[in-house]
Image: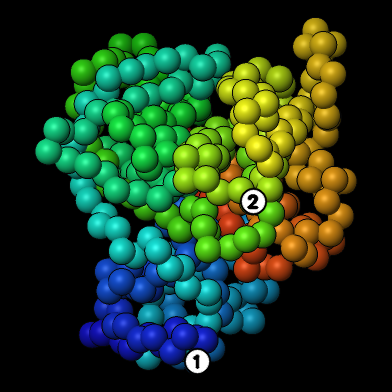
């Protein structure tokens, strides 16, 4: 059984099988709906069901509240059609032209950037080249059938290995493997062979715009932001660009020196590091508090800007809410990628994080 899905306001149509999520069906047929985590935790794929009915799958309450669901809201990454439906959501143009592939890769570099962050470099086979947009991510295909998502920190133009920034989530199946945290278990090492699928995601720089850009990152949410900044510099984009990077301690800003280098060398680029829980021993002299509130203090009116936010769901959700409600940012000018985990889907449980 297949149902017809009509997307408003464009009027484009596609078919979705009864056991296929609306997002999967759209992407399979070249319709670019926005998405991030694909597991009901980030809310990037949220839209309205105008006509017809859907079955909403498991999801985080923070991504879709019961009130929103009652009012016709749905997360298309985990909703299936149960009749012909009409949905309303913005469409994403650009990513749909890039093929999504499953490819093997070899680990060629492991660099400890912080106590809990490793920069992993992956080499593709000589016959493969991954085409992607700055800001997109890949999903590792694990042996147990699970997947783990990480943003590409390398800009698309750069030849050589792909760079990922992986933070240790204690108890996480994959990150325990990366960090060798589980005694007696395998440890990631150079020359290991992995498989991933990509590129994925609708978080990437909209190059057709001329609006000033606010880049907002927490923790390893810096990875796709790095790709965006380096891509913009390479392609000669001159739009004003300000990066706000937040961490609990100064050491969480693990490529702070690189950002300072950009601020010195790139015209129209500004860097604002923000630390929320600095200790006296840190001798931190910079901005303090929540990183998205630093943006609000500097830019009380964001109506003429675009915002690209990446990091923990709590930061991304707060920024989306406060920027649109208080700082007049248009909802369509907020682009985000939440670094979600199983814990975000099961906040009261004890499942592994990554």
Q: Residue at image x 40%, y 45%?
A: 137
**Which residue is labeled 2 in the image?**
239
Q: Residue at image x 61%, y 48%?
A: 238
**Which residue is labeled 1 in the image?**
51
Total labels drawn: 2
- The answer to whether 173 appears left or right of 9 in the picture is left
| Mark toward the viewer: 2 or 1 | 2
Q: Could you tell which of marks 2 and 1 lies nearer the N-terminus?
A: 1
- The answer to whether 351 appears left or right of 279 in the picture is left
On screen, residue 314 above or below 186? below
Q: Residue at image x 79%, y 38%?
A: 290
Q: Residue 345 carries which label?
A: none
Crowding near the residue tagged with mark 2, few <14, some 14–19, many ≥20 C-alpha atoms within 10 Å: some
**Label 2 secondary element:** loop
Crowding near the residue tagged with mark 1, few <14, some 14–19, many ≥20 C-alpha atoms within 10 Å: some
Q: Residue at image x 87%, y 46%?
A: 297
Q: Do the residues labelled 2 and 1 touch (CB within 8 Å)?
A: no
**Observer-nearest of 350 and 97:** 97
**Label 1 secondary element:** strand
Question: How far across and how far down the image is residue 82, in percent?
Answer: 37, 84
Residue 313 visible somewhere in the drawing: no
Question: How far across and how far down the image is residue 230, in percent?
Answer: 50, 37
User: Which quadrant of the view contains residue 324?
Assistant: bottom right
Q: Estimate the spatial distance between the alpha carbons at disc 2 and disc 1, rounded to whole Å.
A: 40 Å
Question: How far across and how far down the image is residue 340, in percent?
Answer: 52, 45
On screen, residue 137 above or below 193? below
């Amino acid at each position: 059984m297949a149902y017809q899905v009509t997307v408003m306001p464009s009027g484009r149509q596609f078919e979705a099988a009864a056991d296929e999520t609306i997002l999967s069906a759209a992407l399979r047929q070249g319709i670019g709906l926005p998405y991030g985590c694909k597991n009901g935790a980030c809310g990037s794929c949220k839209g309205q069901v105008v006509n017809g009915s859907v079955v909403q799958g498991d999801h985080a309450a923070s991504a879709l509240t019961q009130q929103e669901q009652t009012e016709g809201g749905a997360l298309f990454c985990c909703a299936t059609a149960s009749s012909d439906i009409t949905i309303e959501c913005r469409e994403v143009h650009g990513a749909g032209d890039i093929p999504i592939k499953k490819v093997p890769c070899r680990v060629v570099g492991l660099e400890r950037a912080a106590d809990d962050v490793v920069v992993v470099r992956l080499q593709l086979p000589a016959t493969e080249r991954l085409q992607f947009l700055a800001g997109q991510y890949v999903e590792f295909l694990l042996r147990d059938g699970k997947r783990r998502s990480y943003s590409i920190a390398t800009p698309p133009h750069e030849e050589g290995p792909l760079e990922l920034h992986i933070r240790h989530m204690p108890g996480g199946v994959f990150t325990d493997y990366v960090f060798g945290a589980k005694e007696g278990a395998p440890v990631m090492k150079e020359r290991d062979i992995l498989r991933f699928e990509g590129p994925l995601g609708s978080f990437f720089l909209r190059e057709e715009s001329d609006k000033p850009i606010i880049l907002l990152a927490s923790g390893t949410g810096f990875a796709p932001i790095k790709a965006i900044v380096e891509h913009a510099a390479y392609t000669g984009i001159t739009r004003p660009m300000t990066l706000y990077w937040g961490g609990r301690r100064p050491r969480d800003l693990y490529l702070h020196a690189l950002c300072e280098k950009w601020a010195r060398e790139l015209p129209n680029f500004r860097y604002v590091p923000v630390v929320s829980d600095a200790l006296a021993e840190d001798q931190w002299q910079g901005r303090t508090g929540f990183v998205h509130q630093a943006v609000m203090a500097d830019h009380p009116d964001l109506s003429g800007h675009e915002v690209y936010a990446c990091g923990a769901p709590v930061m991304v959700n707060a920024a989306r809410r406060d920027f649109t409600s208080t700082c007049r940012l248009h909802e369509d000018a907020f682009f985000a990628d939440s670094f979600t985990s199983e814990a975000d889907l099961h906040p009261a449980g004890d499942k592994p994080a990554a």
